[in-house]
Structures are given as C-alpha cells and as structure tokens.
Image (tube, rainbow, N blue to C red):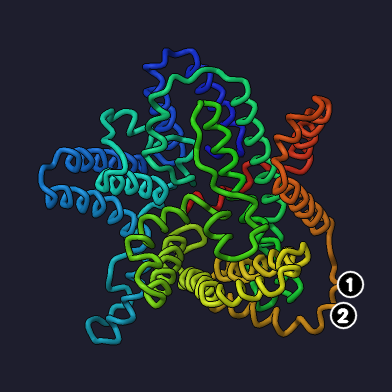
Amino acid sequence: MLFNSLNFFLFLGIVLIFFYVLPSRYRWFWLLVASYYFYISWEPRNAIYLIVATISAYLCGLGIARAGKKTTKTGFLIAGLFINLGILIFVKYYDFLAAQLDPLLIKSGTTTVESFLPRLDLPNPVGLSFFTFSVVTYLVDLYAGRMDLARHPGKFAVYVAFFPKLFAGPIERARYFLPQMARTVRFEEHKITQGLQLILWGMFKKVVIAENLVDLVDKSFSNPLYTPPIALIIGTYFFAFQIYCDFSGYTDIALGVSKLFGIDLKENFRRSYLAVSTAEFWGKRWHISLGSWFRDYLYFPLGGSRAGRTRQYFNLMTVFVVSGLWHGGLGYGVGWSFLVWGALNGLYQWVGVGTAGLWRKAGDRWPMIRDSSAWHVCRVLFTFHLITFSWIFFRANSTEEAWIIIKRISLSLGSLPQYLPRYPFTQEHFTALALIVFLIAVEILDERRSVWEWLNAGPKLVRWTVYYALIFSMLLLGQWQATEFIYMQF
C-alpha cells in the first residue's frame, strides 16, 4: 500500500474516523493494529522482522533499566544492538559479500566452485533500516540516561511500527515520540489543516514532479555507453530533483499524516538544494534525521572533532563511508558505487574543514563580497553541482558505468553549445523543466517565509485557488502508483 494510491487514502480515512471515535485509552491499540495492517499489506511474512525488533528492544530495554551492575547493563545493550544490527547487516549484505568472497576463495585454492558460498536470496523487508535505527536510538538513549524506560509495551510497539514513518522515516527518537503517546489528542482544526497541506504538497512533489522525471532519468542511465552526452547531463540534473522530490515528498506526507493523529514527527528536509555548503546540505537540510543519527550514534562516540584534526578527518570519512554502505544494501542494488558516493561526500567534508579558516579570513577581509547576494548564489550553485556530481555514483548501475558517464560528459562540455540547440527535446523535457523551475521558485520563497504561513495569512480565495491548482495539476500531470518511493528499499 503506497502513499500515492487510492487504497492508502481509503485506509487513512477509516483509521482516522475510528481514532477520533475511540476513547483515548484505546487509541494506541488502534494505531498499532492499523500500523501492522499497513505493513503486512506490503508483504505479510516480513512482519516477523518488525516483531523481532520490537520484542528484542523492549526486553533488552527492561534489562538495561533494571540491571544493578554497569556490566549487566552493557551486556543488555550489546545484546539488543547485536540482534537488531546483526539482522540488518545479514539481510542486506550477505549475498553481496558472498559474491565478493567467492572469487577470492577460488584464487586462494580453497574451492573451484564459482558459487561456493550459498546465496540466500532473502526478501528485502521494506523499512528494515528505519525501524532498526529507531530501536537502536531507544536502547542507546536508555543506556546513556537520556530517557526513561518505555513501560507500556503496546505504546513502545506503536513507536517502532507507526505507519506514516515506517517505510522511509524520518528516524524518530523514542524520547520525543513516546511522550506524545501519553497526551490526549483532540480534533484541532489548525493541526488538521497543517497536516492536509503537507500531504498535498508531498503528493504533488511525488506524483507530479518525481514521477514525470522517472522515465527521462531511467533512459539516460540505462545504457550510458551509447546515450548521447547531452542526455547524460540532462539525466543527471533530473535525477537530483527526482530523488529530492521523491524522498522529501514521502517525508511531507508522513509528517502530514502524523499531524492528523496529533503526533509531530521531526523535520527531515529543509529546502535542501539551497544549501551553501556540503556540510550544511548533509547536516541541516537533507535527510536530517539520518544525518543526526550518524552524528549522535557514530560520529560523537568516535570522538567527533574533540580528538584533534587527524582524528576528526578519520571520523568524518567513517561516517560517510558507513552511510554509503547503508545506502548500498538495497534500493538501486548493492554495489561499490555507493561506497564511492559516500567517500566522495566524506572528501567534501575534509575540504570544507581544511579550508574553513581560509574562507573565514577571506570573508573578514572582504565582507562586502562575503555578505553579497551574488556570492550567496554562487555558493548555492557550487554546492548543488558538487552534490549532483556525487549523485552519479548513487544512481549509476555500477562504478564502471558512473565513470563512463563522467568521462563522456567531461569530453562533451566543449562542444555542448554547438549540439545543445540541435538536441531533439520533447514535450516531456519541457514539462519536467517547468516543474523544476516551479519547485525552485516555491523553495526560494519558502526560505524567506513559510509559503503556508503566507497563504494562511492571506485571502481565502488565494489559498483555495492554490489548493485547487495543485489538485488539478495532480489530476492532469500526476502518475499515480507508478513507482515505489526510492528510499522504501533502503
């Protein structure tokens, strides 16, 4: 059951009606039933992963809270992490690692069989990473004393399985989510309005913008050796906006649906392509919940920037390489290109940290340039192109194909002005471009002041004109239930 389907909205309507009809003390149970139904509607057998994650985390949490000795607490923490991260790593990477090890075993003389290690072809449980990371935050925060024990097993199960965030986040912290479960939720018009606005905008980004870019991107990346360089350039730019609208669209819908139930999820995207540096992009604008997860549960435990510059460089690269590994499990398939993608973004951070002092001195010397709008625009464009370049490794079918794309684009840049006017652009290209320009315009306005705040403060006629325009565009240009959300398979 996808967000961008009629079935989902029928499901949502039923869940909402019963949620507000039921007495408050039973609502957690209704949300739990609805969340598990939502999950098993995708693939019933994968619910076992969700159940194991919930039960193991809850029991290990009890052990941590009740243990008298530090060593016992640590043992329960290790057990919870081992079970949940172990399942995640095994399911996502076993077959890939087996394929990499077989040639080494043949070369060493251990075996002459090409597929010596068995392939398990395990199913890809949708949302596995997201609910695994959620239970890890609970266990670590409980162990560190940042939160109290979740005493109600049912409400804890809702935290793990809450259906708006289940497939692709955001990755919620239990210490923020669980207290909301204790509140009595009343039907509040302003929250319902906010939720519907987010759902509307998220649906527009997914079914109108992202889905109208899918075919153009897929054609560009399907056979890069024989694709015209201009098509590769167009496909690279279009993919940057496809993945952004796909993923941020999912998040908008998730946040909007949650608000309908009186639950606030953490902001996960903040006009990402308006970042002025790659550090700002990854730290404050793109997949914020994952970035903060790696910061708090990997980067800081490794020492962060407190142990000297060399150690900081190591910690930064570790975080981004691990992030590349995480992305490389499912989605576009396991491959070394995700490691390259992660390492490249780690390299960006190295350069940023290494040159921060130089840029600070230059800014102090030429404040007129530093504070000018032109310089700000240049920084935004430069950052966007660094990120877009890295997306090539993310989207390409392999590292080899990524290098082919880069090489063919690089060699064609000199002749681009000559061939660009003769390229056979189609109506689909112009539609996609117009949608991207519209998106950028909205986000620039939103950077100054929330578009929804502006609309809510304005005349009702203008507000409803915008609503109907978005709905009409979805009916006219939208491609419904055409593809899954990209991050559902990560």
Q: Residue at x 73, y 76 (%)?
A: 229
Residue at disc 2, secondary structure:
helix
Q: Which amino acid type is marked by label 2?
A: Gln
**Viewer-closest of 171 and 215:** 171
Residue 131 visible in the displayed image: yes
Query: Which of the numbered marks, if any, corresponds to residue 421?
Result: 1
Q: Which mark is residue 437?
A: none
- For this orientation, the residue located farthest to the left is 69
Residue 157, image x and y in percent? 33, 33
Q: Going by the image, does 266 lie left or right of 136?
A: right
The outermost residue toward the front is: 365
Distance CA(mark 1)–CA(mark 2): 7 Å
| Quadrant assignment, res 158 | top left
When the figure is inspected, residue 28 is found, relative to residue 432, above or below; the finding is: above
Contact, mark 1 vs mark 2 (Cβ under 8 Å): yes
**Viewer-proximal residue among 191 and 18:** 191
Is residue 398 visible to the viewer in this orientation of the structure?
A: no
* Residue 31, quarter of picture: top left
Residue depicted at 33% across the width and 33% down the height:
156
Residue at image position (67%, 62%) is 217
Label 2: how many Cα within 10 Å (few below 14, some 14–19, many 20+): few
Closest to the observer, 418 or 267:
267
Labelled disc at residue 418? 2
From this view, report whether residue 188 is shown above or below residue 374. Answer: above
What amino acid does circle 1 point to? Pro
Horizontal and vertical percent for residue 247?
A: 58, 50
Image x and y of residue 391, in percent: 59, 66
- Image point (35%, 48%), residue name: 132
Secondary structure of the residue carrying numbered label 1 = helix
